[in-house]
Amino acid sequence: MNQTEILGASDIARAAALLRAGELVAIPTETVYGLGANALDAHAVKKIFEVKGRPADNPLIIHVLGTADLDRWCREIPASARLLAARFWPGPVTMILKKSPAIPAQTSAGLDTIAVRCPQTPLTRMLLAAVDFPIAAPSANLSGRPSTTTLRHVLDDLSGKIPAVLDGGDCSVGLESTIIDLTVQPPMLLRPGGITLEQLRSVLGTVTVDPTVLHPPTSSQAPKAPGMKYRHYAPHAPLTLVKGTPSASAAYISAHCRPDCGVLCFEEYLSCFPSAQTICMGSMQDETAQAHLLFDALRQFDETDVQQIFAQCPAEQGLGLALVNRLNKAAGFHIVNLEVKP
Ligand code: TXA
Ligand code: MG
């Protein structure tokens, strides 16, 4: 393949033409960049799996312009879906619903359900308005790598492998969308993200949480979102997640880290590890900043020669649940728990 074209707001027609022709275009969203294809074109969707090296049993999310698309691409839509869409779309929540037969099996990886999401980013909304099909898009990273939240990340993983990327600047949220399964009663959170569990419960009442959101899968308990079972978000060097108060985790890390270690830490503790390579993930008070910086920080470690990484761990409330979920996976559940049990 030739060089990857970088497209902007004046190139929406070009991006739409590429998608119509069955080609891939990376698209910006408020969560992470997506690797887009015409969701109705099985051949185009197959290219997504090939370029990412994505296992064929891992279904894709379809991106749509608004609530009206629910009736077009889904069936047996519960009232909860319309409530969530009215409250949070466009925005970072993805709903699992029964699939219309118009969506090919390649897109849903053979499932009878489909993941639907309505992104916020203006350029991608312009692109959706210019085509008459939903855009299937997983995160625009090579499988196993941290998701891409900047144009630079997309080019690092996919340059020369895809015809074009739509440049929307840096992603504002920085973590993938919340996924909620509305085909079960009560609804179940499959992946925490920018719309928090607390926000979902404020609209829907009871929402259960897939146990694998915070605990390693077991042989009898696989994640309900097939993609969550794969090693994910991982930098090359092994990562140890240190749970506890920020001061306790900082003390543990400073006692255990060697000069060839990296430390992912809160801004307030940057000066505590003078011999290690530190990367800041924002203030300990500011989960929004932490979400925004996490994947870039994990990617930055891959440009160093650190042999081991320690990370301080945010609290599990609000956006923190999504941060801890991604850090657990990046660490392969290698966790040091300093929390005092009640
Ligand atoms: O924020 C996002 O959601 C981004 C942007 C690009 O929209 N997309 C994204 O896609 O994170 P991906 O493919 O990296 O993650 C989609 C997750 C996977 O874990 C997949 O297994 C799950 O959604 N999923 C998709 N369809 C599903 C279904 N029908 N039932 C259960 N899980 C599903
Ligand atoms: Mg992904």
Image (tube, grey):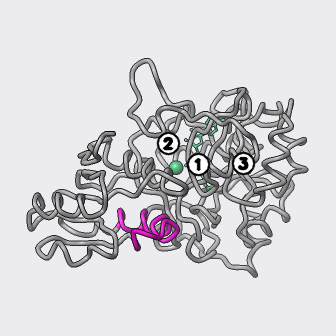
Q: Which residue is mark 1?
A: 48
Q: Is residue 147 above or below residue 293?
A: above
Q: Are marks 1 and 2 in contact (CB under 8 Å)?
A: yes
Distance from Cα at disc 1 to Cα at disc 2: 8 Å
Disc ID at residue 202: 3
Q: Which residue is mark 2?
A: 54
Examine the image and state in which quarter residue 172 appears: bottom right
- What's under tag 3, amino acid-wise? Ser
Examine the image and state in which quarter residue 29 appears: bottom right
Distance from Cα at disc 3 to Cα at disc 1: 36 Å
Please report the residue visible at 76 percent of the width from the left and 73 percent of the height from the top.
12
Judged from the image, the secondary structure of the residue bearing numbered disc 3 is helix
* Camera-nearest residue between 30 and 334: 334
* Relative horizontal placement of residue 135, taking residue 72 as reference (left or right): left
Judged from the image, the secondary structure of the residue bearing numbered disc 2 is loop
Give the mark nearer the N terminus: 1 vs 2: 1
Distance from Cα at disc 2 to Cα at disc 3: 35 Å
- What's under tag 1, amino acid-wise? Ile
Residue 76 at what x, y percent from top left?
Answer: 86, 29
In which quadrant will I find the C terminus? top left
Residue 269 at what x, y percent from top left?
Answer: 27, 73
Please report the residue visible at 84 percent of the width from the left and 54 percent of the height from the top.
86
